[in-house]
Image (cartoon, helix red, strand yellow):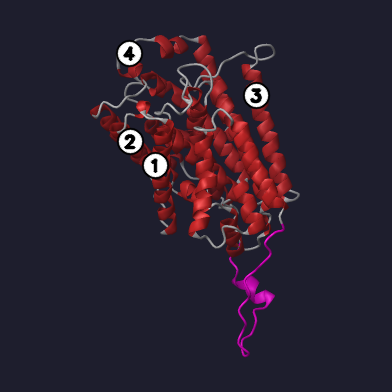
Amino acid sequence: MLWSVLQARQSFFKPYTPLGFAVDFLLNVGALLLSVTLYSSAPLLLNILLLTAAFIVYALPPNVSRRKKPKLPPNAQPKTASTSSASATPLSVISTKPFLTHYRGNMMVVTCICILAVDFRLFPRRFAKVETWGTSLMDMGVGSFVFSAGVVASRAVLKERAEGMTTPLAIRLASSLRHSLPLLGLGVIRLISVKGVDYAEHVTEYGVHWNFFFTLGLLPPFVALFQSALKFVPSYAGLAVLLGVLYQIVLESTGLKAYILVSPRTNLLSMNREGIFSFWGYLAIFLAGQDVGMLVLPRNLGPGSKRTTLWLKLGAWSLGWFVLYSLCTDYKYGAGLTVSRRMANLPYMLWVVAFNSVLVLAFAVVDTFLFPAFYKATDSKTEKEAYEIATSRVLRAYNRNGLPVFLVANLLTGLVNLTVPTLDVGAGTTMAILLAYMVALTGFAVVLDMYDVTIKL
């Protein structure tokens, strides 16, 4: 929020100077790093400090200085409204919303911080992934990664619908495999490297051989298959809930829950049972993310102002997911189920979706309140300029190349763990290592963005 207020009221990051980059990094990376380390026991204090600064900046007189327009030569003819509108590129049916860039960028930053910070004693154990039952920051992180991937995956579906096209299932599957193979390849590389260097790992997280890249790699073809089910259940949210409920019924009514939790690891299936069966929960989370994308990405959101309509739709869906989660977990009036990231059961799926829906709503409220110009743009050039003004360069870079940045973060994490006794270093050394790590990672992301490079896997 402080970044948005600085930009909206003071145009602090326009033009984008080295000082602007430093402040951008401190606000959008440094503050998150502090929140999970030095300020982990006092998050309220950190929030108060940031919000107080934001309110002070907002109360200051806005920076209304503008660059002087260049004087036209005496014989030059000014552009008329008609010629300007004729040369303007019309807006597409789908827009790249600034608040989604900030939401996905923040999620990536927190994820990258935590995968290394968890190996240090300064990182609170309550933030690390739980063994079987309960919730934690990193349990939310892995689900949020899948949810956000679902949000952006809805763009292809919306474009297809806008063009009035229907892609046959065989073509959808072939296209999905092109996205899956690189991820599955990364999963194999990670498996070989982890086993080769005898890197410490928790078997109960995904299994003996399974890892998160395998889960990500299997999502595209199954999403393509489930898209055919929209003929019968015309809603991604409905498909997500249906899949989550059916998976939970199987867990409760068969021996699958006991098999996942206590079965001996005697064959390939039992060795990797957590990753294989939790996949269905992650698939449900991905489908729910697609539903949010279908909700917020279209330019025409419905009658009324774009800002009000966006708030009302996101607010209603956030409340709906929260009610479902409450009914699922409440012991007095609901089913009394407990969240388990290890199984990715129904309570876990609803917890992740409800939290992320509220988070998207919060980003949308700040964005649409402080940067209304983006939502009033009448042509693509004006909208692009408004988008660049309303988005952090750092968060935009993380969002643009999220998967490559995540891959580099994993490589750097392994490098640090192989060279530093992470459990033996003090708070000062820990912060220095984490800060250097995030500077390197942010530099990598921003350089890619500066050179207009987008790496798609």
Residue at image position (69%, 64%) is 64
In the picture, the quarter occupied by the C terminus is: top left
Give how far apart the Cα atoms at labels 3 and 2 are: 41 Å
The disc label shown at residue 437, or none: 1
Determine which residue is flagged by label 3.
324
**Depth check: 9 or 195 in front?**
9
Q: What's drawn in magenta, residue-wise?
A: 61-90
**Depth check: 184 or 36 in front?**
36
Instruction: Please determine whether, in this image, residue 173 is positioned above or below residue 212.
Output: below
> Disc 3 or disc 2, which is closer to the eye?
2
Marks 2 and 4, the one that precedes in the sequence? 4
Determine which residue is flagged by label 4.
265
Give how far apart the Cα atoms at labels 2 and 1 are: 9 Å
The disc label shown at residue 416, or none: 2
Marks 2 and 1, the one that precedes in the sequence? 2
Point out residue 232 in the picture as x, y percentages from the top left corner.
58, 31
> Disc 3 or disc 1, which is closer to the eye?
1
Instruction: Please determine whether, in this image, residue 173 is positioned above or below residue 451.
Output: above
